Image (cartoon, rainbow, N blue to C red):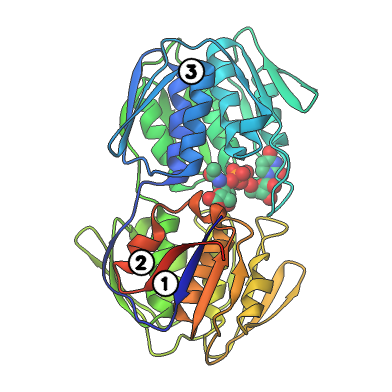
Amino acid sequence: MDQIEIKGGRPLRGEIDVSGAKNAALPLLFATLLASGESRLGNVPQLRDIATVGKLLEIFGAEVEREGSALRIDTRGLVSVEAPYELVKTMRASVLALGPLTARFGHARVSLPGGCAIGARPINLHLKGLEAMGAEITLDHGYVEARAERLKGARIYLDIPTVTGTENLLMAAALAEGETVLENAAREPEIIDLAEALVKMGARIEGAGSDTIHIQGADDLAPYEHCTMPDRIEAGTFLAAAAVTGGDVLVHGARAEHLEALLAKLREAGVEIVAEADGLRVRGPERLRAVSIKTSPHPGFPTDMQAQFMALMCLAEGTSVISENVFENRFMHVCELQRMGADISVDGHAATVRGIEGLCGAPVMATDLRASASLIVAGLAAENTTRISRIYHLDRGYERIEEKLAGLGAEIRRVKES
Ligand code: EPZ
């Protein structure tokens, strides 16, 4: 298996491009199931998870072709509504097939995704919402089956503003009979991107991006032409990498309105961030100041940036308390950072990070997607060499990250496992 080797301590300088957002492209690809015809999605990153969705759509009977940075999806030949365990176990976002298939065909059979490294990640709220719309939900042999003559609009209160739960129900409501109101809906920018594509398909949606979304169901929908929004978490990861190495980088595609909480905390830590042309310029200080964070649903501090921000705080002046309030087990990166000399203690949902002068490169292991990003950030700032194993986690969400960072002067390369 590949590893990534970093010789740290070099400030990053130059310009870098953000790819299309993985967490927008995934629901957007499933949304093509709502219509019969040829959709085209631009700015789709070349990632393992995207390839997995492509395979899943082909199992349903769609044709999926990559044309440069776009994907063309033809759904005129759909023959199956079953998402098999072999694929779903590799990517839990496959659960996003439930809403569109049930809405379009009255039937969906999706393997339960099971837990993952960062938490149990149940889908009870997805199912509760579909039941409220009239679907009959049954669980058997590890599969969830949804059936409905035709989904009916309903008023649904989400106990937790679940991101993919909101996306699943948004897509289901787009073809349901009558009006659906999603209350306490997720407000992430990826929800707005999905709603924009659904509106292009003929859906009538108001309030996407707020905590209450109104959807008037249509009798049928048309294919879309759409361009995926830039990946705000990739952008945030590059901002963190430039900040921790005392660099000066222009991140093309980074949008301040997608990252307000992160930018506020980076500025509090002494990082200079300026909006320029089509991105954000970030300059790292001599030494970062310690800042505490609490993750929460958008517009709060994004849980997907918690691990990367912790890597910064390992080197800051002072003590930072990092509270993870979205997932129950998202501190897997802590023991790897401790191997690099970080002074961190964890007590339940809170990690206390006492900043030190320098981290020391070491062999470390990636455990989940954003934990691997945090090890990259730490390795870029550490003295000597850091070797990161199990980087298949990283390849799920970052397109050619070592090439992009090498373009900023980082000494980073992909090597075969020694
Ligand atoms: C999405 O996951 C993202 N994935 C995650 O990004 C991200 O961390 C997460 O939202 C939070 O922002 C995609 O968009 C593909 P949730 P999702 O449902 O939708 C609980 C990454 O690194 N919950 O908002 O699965 C759940 O257990 C990934 O790119 C229920 O209890 O997250 C969690 O504690 C990781 N019941 C909380 O809600 C449900 O039915 C938030 O989960 C659904 C969720």
Where does residue 287 sit, x and y in percent of width and height?
44, 89
Position of 7 relative to 187 (above/below): below
Sequence-first disc among 2 and 1:
1
* Residue neighbourhood size for the residue with mark 2, other residues' Cα within 10 Å, grouped as few (<14), some (14–19), many (≥20): many
Q: Secondary structure at mark 3?
A: loop
Sequence-first disc among 3 and 1:
3
Q: Is residue 169 left or right of residue 136?
A: left
**Disc 3 to disc 1, how far (Cα)?**
44 Å
- Looking at the picture, which amino acid does disc 3 mark? Gly
Where does residue 379 sit, x and y in percent of width and height?
50, 75
Confirm whether residue 109 shows in the render.
Answer: yes
- Asked if ligand 1 lies within 8 A of label 2, the reply is no
Residue visible at 40% across and 27% down in the picture: 198
Can you say which quadrant of the picture contains the C terminus?
Answer: bottom right
Query: Which numbered marker is on residue 354?
Result: none
Return the residue at label 1: 241
Sequence-first disc among 3 and 2:
3
Return the residue at label 2: 405
Mark 2 touches mark 1? (CB < 8 Å)? yes
Position of 175 relative to 238 (above/below): above
Closest to the camera, between mark 2 and mark 1, is 2
Q: Is residue 155 left or right of residue 189?
A: right
In the picture as drawn, the residue positioned furthest to the front comes out as: 418
Closest to the camera, between mark 3 and mark 2, is 2
Query: Which numbered marker is on residue 217?
Result: 3
Where does residue 306 sit, x and y in percent of width and height?
56, 65
Position of 60 relative to 248 (above/below): above
The number of callouts visible is 3
Place residue 66 in its image quadrant.
top left
- Looking at the picture, which amino acid does disc 2 mark? Leu
Q: Secondary structure at mark 2?
A: helix
Residue visible at 40% across and 62% down in the picture: 402
